Image (cartoon, rainbow, N blue to C red):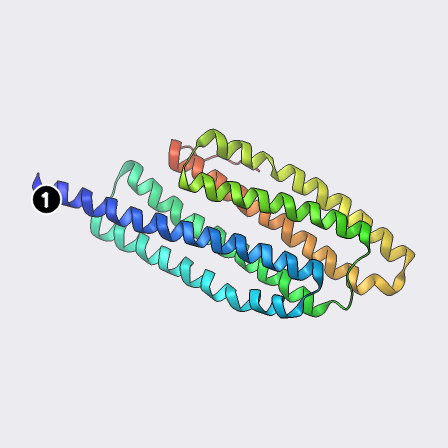
Amino acid sequence: MHLMVLTHQSLSKDEKIIQGLISSMGHAVSEGFRRSSDAFMEHDRELASEVIAGDQQINALCSQIEEQCFVTIALRQPVANDLRSLLANMHIAQEYERIGDYAADIARKVHDMQAMPKKECKDHFQLMIDLCMLMLDQVNALLENPDEQGARVLAAEDDKVDEEESVLVDSLISQMRKDPDSIESCVHAISVAHKMERIADRVTNIAERIVFSTSGEMVELG
């Protein structure tokens, strides 16, 4: 009995460490996206380079979380809710790692582009950025205080990002028709819009893992 208590205490300690790492990774990813978006909107190549370099920190956190989860599973042999939570956290770390990659990809586009799209397109981009940033902030909060219904509501926000991407792409295509000299920059901008849409998809995937962790139900929310 004493051994079971010690094992449970060790498991709880490991889970707290993992939760702390997940929280750190979530905030690092949000900050990375915010900075990459600023770099894109302001065409700031120096800031873009900083975001690209910072992606290594996010990758390292992902590896650290995965390793800690594997060690905890091997040593503590968790079952039921604890095992479900550990498996969910590994997937969440991988989703955050991909969001970090997308933020770095957006930053790389700053180096590829010679000019930003016109103001109308920038306004659409700002709305997409705001929507993605809101989703990231909300999912970070939900991971600290898991709530199944909150996760389901958050996932529904993905539709707004999809709709805004469609409007933005139409606007960029219209700009290319009016100004052939802008084609190259607009093609890069369309790629950036797609990266933002994928970020929202990844946040939705994390919301699905929150539902799984809290209820045991695997759902497709997107």
Numbered label tally: 1
Looking at the image, residue 53 lies above or below residue 193: below
The residue located at (41%, 49%) in the rendering is: 23
* Image point (80%, 47%), residue name: 170
Coordinates of residue 124 in the picture (x, y in percent) = 75, 47
Residue 170 visible here: yes
Instruction: Give residue 172's position: percent from left, percent from top.
Output: 81, 53
Quarter of the image with the N terminus in it:
top left
Q: Which residue is mark 1?
A: 3
Query: Which quarter of the rendering shows the C terminus?
Result: top right
Residue 54 in the image: above or below residue 72: below
Crowd tier of the residue under label 1, counting other residues whose Cα lies within 10 Å: few below 14, some 14–19, many 20 or above: few
> What residue is rendered at 74% in x and 44% in y?
166
**Does dot 1 land on a helix, a strand or a loop?**
helix
Tell me residue 191's x, y (percent): 70, 57
Q: Residue furthest top?
A: 149
**Viewer-proximal residue among 17 and 220:** 17
Relative image position of residue 33 (x, y in whole percent): 58, 55
Residue at 42%, 58% (x, y): give it: 62
Mark 1 is on which residue type?
Leu
